[in-house]
């Protein structure tokens, strides 16, 4: 889905991001980043942009020799959940998942996704990045319901310990913003940014 048949490389191992890209009609190659994430910013919006850029740069350096003399695009992304100034990453164990979900029960929190686009065009590297924020509101969820969900282990690889597209969906009262941003990739904004670059 590129007007110039420019290869797109997704710098993410997330199956959810790949699924969103595929559903949207993109042809792309997955090359996960192996960089150790280094948080250097303080606000959630800048943190996700920095982490997305770190991932994209890592993959860019890895694959650029494979595309010698060719144009290509690397897309990196990072998602975090934030409540009352506290950043909630992926849980280390089931107890941490329970504590996170208990904190978010009957409250509204924010999900931020940062996206970095690295575009090598005629030998020059161009860098673009942005972030999207979505508000997510949970219903009140009791301890039994939380433990029942955690037992599915769906929570273990997700920021904030839940997936909006999985079994926990029944506890989500509403969202304000982009649904796909909560899943992990704000696909509409990404498409609009790629359109500005005249590559889709």
Image (cartoon, rainbow, N blue to C red):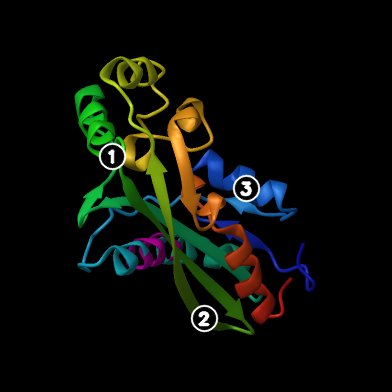
Under circle 3, the secondary element is: helix
The mark closer to the camera, 2 or 3, is 3
Circle 2 crowding by C-alpha within 10 Å: few under 14, some 14–19, many from 20: few
Circle 3 crowding by C-alpha within 10 Å: few under 14, some 14–19, many from 20: some
Under circle 1, the secondary element is: helix
The disc, 1 or 2, on the residue closer to the chain's N-terminal end is 1
Q: Is residue 12 visible?
A: no
Q: Which mark is residue 125?
A: 2
Under circle 2, the secondary element is: strand
Name which residue lies at 69% across and 47% down. 22
Cβ atoms under marks 3 and 1 closer than 8 Å: no
Q: Which residues are magenta?
A: 49-56
- Residue to which mark 3 is pinned: 20
How much space separates mark 1 and mark 2, taking CA atoms? 41 Å
The disc, 3 or 1, on the residue closer to the chain's N-terminal end is 3
How much space separates mark 2 and mark 3, taking CA atoms? 26 Å
Cβ atoms under marks 2 and 3 closer than 8 Å: no
Q: Give yes or no for residue 184 being in the magenta stretch.
A: no
Reply above or below: 115 against 22: below
Residue 4: x and y in percent read 78, 73
Cβ atoms under marks 1 and 2 closer than 8 Å: no
Instruction: Give the quarter of the figure containing the N terminus.
Output: bottom right
Residue 148: x and y in percent read 36, 15
Q: Is residue 93 left or right of residue 65?
A: left
Tell which of 87 and 23 is nearer to you: 87
Q: Which mark is residue 104?
A: 1
How much space separates mark 3 and mark 1, taking CA atoms? 26 Å
Residue 104: x and y in percent read 28, 39
Residue 19: x and y in percent read 63, 43
Circle 1 crowding by C-alpha within 10 Å: few under 14, some 14–19, many from 20: many
């Amino acid at each position: 889905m590129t007007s110039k048949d420019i290869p797109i490389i997704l710098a993410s191992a997330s199956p959810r991001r790949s699924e969103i890209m595929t559903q949207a009609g993109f042809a792309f190659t997955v090359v996960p980043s192996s960089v150790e994430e280094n948080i250097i910013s303080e606000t959630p919006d800048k943190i996700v942009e920095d982490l997305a850029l770190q991932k994209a740069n890592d993959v860019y350096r890895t694959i650029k020799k494979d595309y010698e003399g060719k144009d290509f695009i690397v897309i990196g992304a990072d998602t975090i959940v934030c409540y009352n100034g506290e950043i909630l990453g992926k849980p280390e164990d089931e107890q941490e998942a329970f504590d996170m979900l208990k904190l978010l029960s009957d409250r509204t929190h924010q999900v931020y996704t940062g996206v970095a686009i690295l575009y090598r065009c005629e030998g020059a590297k161009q860098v673009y990045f942005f972030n999207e924020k979505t508000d997510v509101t949970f219903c009140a969820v009791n301890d039994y319901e939380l433990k029942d969900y955690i037992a599915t282990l769906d929570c273990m690889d997700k920021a904030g310990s839940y997936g909006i597209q999985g079994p926990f969906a029944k506890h989500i009262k509403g969202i304000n913003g982009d649904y796909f941003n909560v899943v992990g990739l704000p696909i509409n904004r990404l498409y609009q940014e790629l359109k500005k670059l005249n590559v889709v």
